[in-house]
Image (cartoon, grey):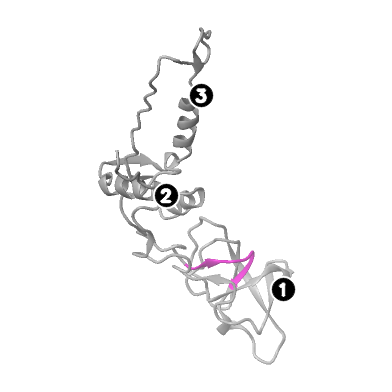
Amino acid sequence: MTDKMLSVEQAVTNITACAQALKDVDTIALEDALGRTLAAAIHSPIDVPAADNSAMDGYALNVDDLAQGEAKTKLPVMQIITAGADAAALTRNTAARIFTGADIPQGANAVVMQEQCDIYEGSVCVPNDTPVGNNIRPRGQDICTGEKIFDKGRVLKPQDLGLLAAIGHSHIKVIRPLSVAIISTGNELVNPGTALKPGQIYNSNRYLLIGLLNKL
């Protein structure tokens, strides 16, 4: 034959040109999605965080209630707000004990971290120079409703699964993976675990290829 042999690069190009993109889609549980390929772009259906919340353990208050010309203001503590609790609106000239991640009560516009407060029985003294928005994580600070999170075709990593969970996804649509057949030919090949006869060898390439394919 006089035809010139193909280079490896040209052979890969030819094979790729003949390949058809996979179109079949599976819907799978999020815990099974590691390493799978997204079938569609993902947009967030919610804000993260879903409401203004406290970045610190401390005391929620309204800065308009702080005294002028003094170092600190003493406020009665009227409620305790933990993460996940439904807080009542803050009464003017009071404070609320609040913990990290808890929703900011209506009427409050700042949080003073507990290390900056003086605690008395039923009351708290807070610095008067506390600014509006202090230690508050605003709604949607991390992710806004409708924001694109991932593009179609993304191969999912462990941290991606955490992010998908954070926006409420329990199941996602992914591309169905390839089905690959490995066919070994040759009378000399036998599987490991079988006694070799004269002229035979163990089929080591099969297991090498299985490993490489699974790694992909």
Rendered view: 111 above or below 30: below
Magenta stretch encompasses residue 87: no
Mark with earlier residue (2, 3): 2
* For residue 102, side relative to residue 20 (left or right): right
Return the residue at label 2: 155
Residue 211: percent from left, percent from top: 49, 32
* Residue in the picture at 39% in, 53% down: 154
Residue 60 found in image quarter: bottom right
> Which residue type carries mark 2?
Val
Q: Is mark 3 in CB contact (under 8 Å) with mark 1?
A: no
Which picture quadrant has residue 5?
Answer: top left
Helix, strand or loop for disc 3: helix
Pointer 1 residue = 116
| 23 versus 44 height, above or below | above
Q: Residue at x 31, y 48 (%)?
A: 16
Of the pair 187 and 62, the residue shown nearer to us:
187
Q: Which residues are magenta?
A: 52-60
Is residue 117 visible in the rendered structure shown here? no
Q: Is residue 99 above or below residue 165?
A: below
Q: Is residue 107 visible?
A: yes
Q: Which residue is mark 3?
A: 204
SS at mark 1 in the image:
helix
